[in-house]
Amino acid sequence: MNALRRLGPALFAPVLAVVVAVVISSVVMAALQVNPLRVFEVMVDFGETPSQQITALVVIVNRAVPLFLAGLAVAVAFRMGLFNIGVEGQYRLATIIAAAAGAAVSLPGPVHVVFIIVVAMLVAAIWAGLVAVLKVTRGVSEVISSIMLNFVALGLASYLLTGPFRGSAPGTNIVGTKVIPESGWVPGLNKIFDVLGLANPPRQLYGFLIIAVVAGVLVSVLLNRTRFGYDLRASGISPSAASASGVNARAMVVKTMLLSGAIAGLIGLPDLLGSTHAYTTNFTAGLGFLGIAVALLGRNKPGGIALAALLFAFLDRSLVPLQIADYPASVVTIFQGTIVLAVVIANEIARRVARRTAERDTAEPAAAAPAGSTDARQEVQA
Amino acid sequence: MPAPAGGVPYAVELRGITKRFPGVVANRDIELRVARGEVHAIVGENGAGKSTLMKTLYGMHRPDEGTIMLDGREVHFRSPADAIAAGIGMVHQHFMLADNFTVLENIVLGSEPTRGPRLDRARARERITEISDRYALDLEPDVLVEELGVGDRQRVEIAKVLYRGATTLILDEPTAVLVPQEVDELFGNLAELKREGLTVIFISHKLDEVRKVADSITVIRRGTTVGEADPRTTTARQLAEMMVGAELPSPETRTSTVRDTVVLELRDVTVATPSGRPAVDAVDLVVREGEVVGIAGVEGNGQAELVDAVMGLRSLVSGVVRLGDEDITAWSTRDRREAGIGLIPEDRHRQGMLLDATLWENRILGHQTRPPAAKGWFIDRKAARADTERIMKEYDVRAPGPDTLAVALSGGNQQKLIVGREMESRPRLLVAAHPTRGVDVGAQSAIWELLKDARAEGMGILLISADLDELIGLSDTLMVMLRGRLVATLDPGTCTPEQLGGHMTGAHSAAGAA
Amino acid sequence: MSTAVTTPEAPGRGPINGLLTGGSRYRRLLWILAGAVVVLAAVRVISGEDALTSSSTMAAALLLAVPIGLAALGGLFAERAGVVNIGLEGMMILGTWGAGWAGYQWGWAAALVGGVLFGALGGLLHAVATVTFGVDHVISGVAINILAAGIVRFLSELLYTKNVKGGGVTQSPALSSKPPTLSLPVLSSGPDLLGHVERLHWFLISDVAGVLRGVSHEVGVLTVLAVLLIPASYLLLWRTAFGLRLRSCGENPWAADTLGVAVYRMKYIAVVISGALAGMGGVFLVFIAGIYRENQTNGRGFIGLAALIFGNWRPGGLAAGAGLFGFADALQLRSRSAVVALLLLVAILLAVLAITQAIKGNVLQSVIAGVVAVGALIAFLTIDVLPPGIVSFTPHLTTLLVLSLASQRLRPPQADGLVYRRGES
């Protein structure tokens, strides 16, 4: 019960945001003569047979894994007060290079996978590091430089895909890198369903889920339990106080961006290593910006980000059923967008409420002090 | 004085003003009567409620109870614009000036003279020059405020209210950043204003100044009016007792505890600013074990940069910093802290605390690489919390517990926590910048005692302060900083505030500039 | 007895040094502009890429500079009032959609109104989030960008897929009319003297002719009006009482509040104007293409923000920045081989930078600049044509390079980006 009481204020903002988003989207839909209740019905309909339902769950979780990683990458930077908006470019560039590298070598099973992961993390970290270096040496705002580098990265990826890294035959519609040999594949987790006695769905549950969970735990421990994490969070709360306490501000910016980039490098890997095994022209895009939304909704904490990722994945999954039922599928994008704006406003309100309650809780016992004591305890707005 | 002489109504009369904020009653049943054409002082300690009262009078917020009467008529202000229209002008303690604007732009903002849609700068310039001449304010309309010194900025603030036709001026702690000679200049300006028939309300906690310039005094304590006083018949001591309600604390000198070992040595230290001018100019300084070296000076003469240089937050253009035997000039801030330098920063909210974090996280700030905070690479939460509880008890930090957010504490309690955490690490050298600024009387004397005890145990203290009593009372050696140089070394036992002020402004003769 | 600080006297200068670097800011800017034209002309002659200074490129540059410049102007209004507006891109997107939707039904005038209105709504949203609720400005801007993309996709899907021909999820039907154009009488049309001089391909003279003709031949009336918005903004912000109050909100809102300025209201107005201007930028993109297309903005809202920073938050400066980035944009669209010639330009500029840094004694920066300059030169000599993927980010890379190399003497409004709450200090 005590845990719930402590969690309460933390849940308040995201829940409020989702509720507001639902209301606003419903109003918009109704105004455009779309029945919101029917839309929600279609979204929640997972199918009749157990196999269909499990499949839907698998699709959702598979979609949530990269979203979670994206949110994690953005959140690590946010905690330090940095905006890593370049996650989109970082992961796309990292994925294509890792795909090409993975297809170019042949190593024994797990080593091959580790190699691909390391390449992806390195590339993305370096790309993010560029942003940090520009900020620290030339004072360029990381917001603008990372957005510009996004475009550069996408351009580079497009060039690499149609040029040096092209693996598919000329003349095909969908271009891709060479396919990664099987030693570089991450197997699915469908054995779990057999163990639990549930229906075995036709889709494979990404094995990368485990790596993502491990990453989330590691990040959580790093931020909350280590000295480095303390320095990082202090820099985010008050850069001047952190500097006065001995944190080297510039080094912190670089280290944080490298870390954030490294995590971003993982974003494309669940899809790459679990299903497509090559980087193609229609590889999943937009995860970088959705990652920002997920991080905001999850209030920059790994637990919250996981829940937010599941929510967004659930919304994404409902695109196909909506199209089949002949509803405008982009109502989902409205929903996602409204959530983002609602959550930032709700977060701000929640923070203010928390401050106000903290001040009130501290002032009250002091006000009960006996009259006539000479020291004025309250810091009056004098 | 319930009724004014001659039947002329009071220029300003406040009856029963009460103002509450969440968790605290700032003003309770305040009574104030100011006659037209007089200089009226409102005195009270830090935190007594004076500024809140003036904000009410200036329309920045509305009182929960009570009435405001101007020249016998009741008024209700919804915003400063209403107060300005009624002829009330406020000169704030913390100047409200836009650095990137010129003097002219700052003065006319909100009341701009226009010719059609265009801003009529010529007319503005004319009017400002007229006011400047009439009241001897010496203003240059087209200078950027950024380039002005403190005294000039205050005169711009005064011009702002005069430009709007203020007939009643409120000055909030106007002498807080001035030295004695500049204070006399200001009082000269006030006499000029009085001669022109204006009314001045003057907030201060400096009793000697108040007695010099005020015609009548109202004393406020803990949010309510304690009484009125006539400066001609009331002594400073009686005023002080009305203000505090008890004996005044004061730092006393004790027997010398200065030892021989040098803790801190600065040799030829120079720190530059982006414009190239040195903020700290070839400073030589020595602090020994058991010694308090006090640095006096008007704010902005390099004290902040000196602290940054000692802490490693700024790089030196030249010079050497030694801690004991070691040359630490190239050391990082973290290394210096670990070697035993503690810091009580000038601005605790900016450099000393993480407001949105818990108290235990604040306790380990600055010491996060050593026990009890650290265990290898990790933070030892349990030990940190336990230690925070201990510090809270020992240093009388009043808060519900170590998990309280720092923002919830009063300034005095925040400062006590900071002092406690710095003392606990047993530094060899403590840099204390304005250690009792914005802190109530009780916490102030507690902090002074802590500093004296630490000094007796052999800690070296570099004390930077604007509180002359604090400097004179605590220092073993007293230096004055002016434009980045240490221009004088005085004996705190024998020097006077006037002497000190003279060195602080660069007037070397005892008579001072006139 | 003022205690004003006196700055030390500048060291003595020789006559040529004084001529080049002394004097007012305008004189120095004129020199830089002249130098730029000369260097550009030289590069054209060396590389043989006439597209660099041709009037068609210059016309395209002007055309593309306008949306960037309008976005930058939008950023100016918001930031001068203290609100950082990262959401310019989103407001521009809304503007493009509004222009497309109104334009195909009712013509170009309606497109203008529609785009501005949609952009202003985006601005209103940003104002509500940042001014009323106190959300961090960058976060709110990013959220609006995400939301805007979703909204236009949704509206397109709803309105264009079923019953309208030419429209789809990612584009609108074509505009039903285009705005009028005009040309300078003798110089740019009829006898077309400037065109004649341009075709002679003489060093510097033809280049100048190309530049002049580009901005005076069949220029849209609205383009001219948009350019006039820049001096108009200067007059509004620096010469009126309204402008003084708006700027005070970005310098010291607490001071402004004590003097009776309605700070919240000013910020709202500024941010809504900001959105309207960004929306107008979107309108111009639609005019160029004749149609609304998804992702038309391609980051130009952000490039506009960069132009604002490059211009040191002044209208004249941001116009120069917009012109520069517009030029890079135009070059990339018109001629991929000409972009290679840009590499030579970069090599020359970096070489100059390396020399100046070496004189100042910054060895590391000088070496880095020198190495990159050599690299750019080699690239220029060895590459014929850049592949489309690489060329696509020419304007973005230009933006990045310019921001990185520009001197750090930037002066944003003092309270820019600060979350202002009345009563809290």
Image (tube, grey):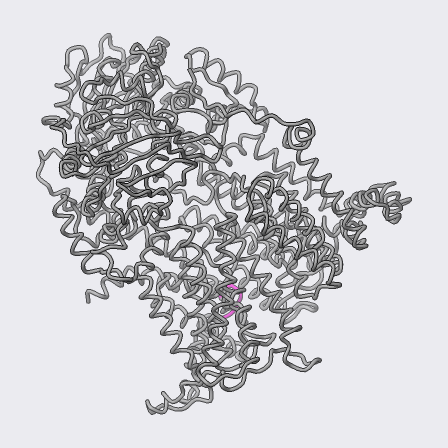
Of residues A278 and B504, the one nearer the viewer is: B504
**Residue A31 part of the magenta-drawn span:** yes
Quadrant assignment, res A148: bottom right
Question: Does the magenta stretch mainly form a helix, a strand or a loop?
Answer: loop
At horizontal 59% and vertical 61% (from top left) the residue drawn is A151
Of residues B452 and A8, the one nearer the viewer is: B452
At horizontal 61% and vertical 39% (from top left) the residue drawn is C315
Does residue C109 appear in the picture of this structure?
no
User: Quick one: quadrant of the C terminus of chain C?
Assistant: top left
Quadrant assignment, res B341: top left
User: Quick one: quadrant of the N terminus of chain C?
Assistant: top left
Vertical order, C169 against B514 (above or below)? below
- Looking at the image, residue A345 sits to the left or right of residue B180; the answer is right
The percent coordinates of residue A51 (x first, y second) are 42, 89
Vertical order, C6 against B314 (above or below)? above
The percent coordinates of residue B324 (x first, y second) are 26, 41
Of residues B122 and B241, the one nearer the viewer is: B241
The percent coordinates of residue C403 (x first, y second) are 58, 48
Q: How many tags in the picture?
A: 0
* Magenta highlight range: A30-34
**Residue C258 part of the magenta-drawn span:** no
Residue placed furthest toward the right: C191
Vertical order, A49 against A23 (above or below)? below
The percent coordinates of residue A20 (x first, y second) are 40, 61
At horizontal 19% and vertical 64% (from top left) the residue drawn is A2
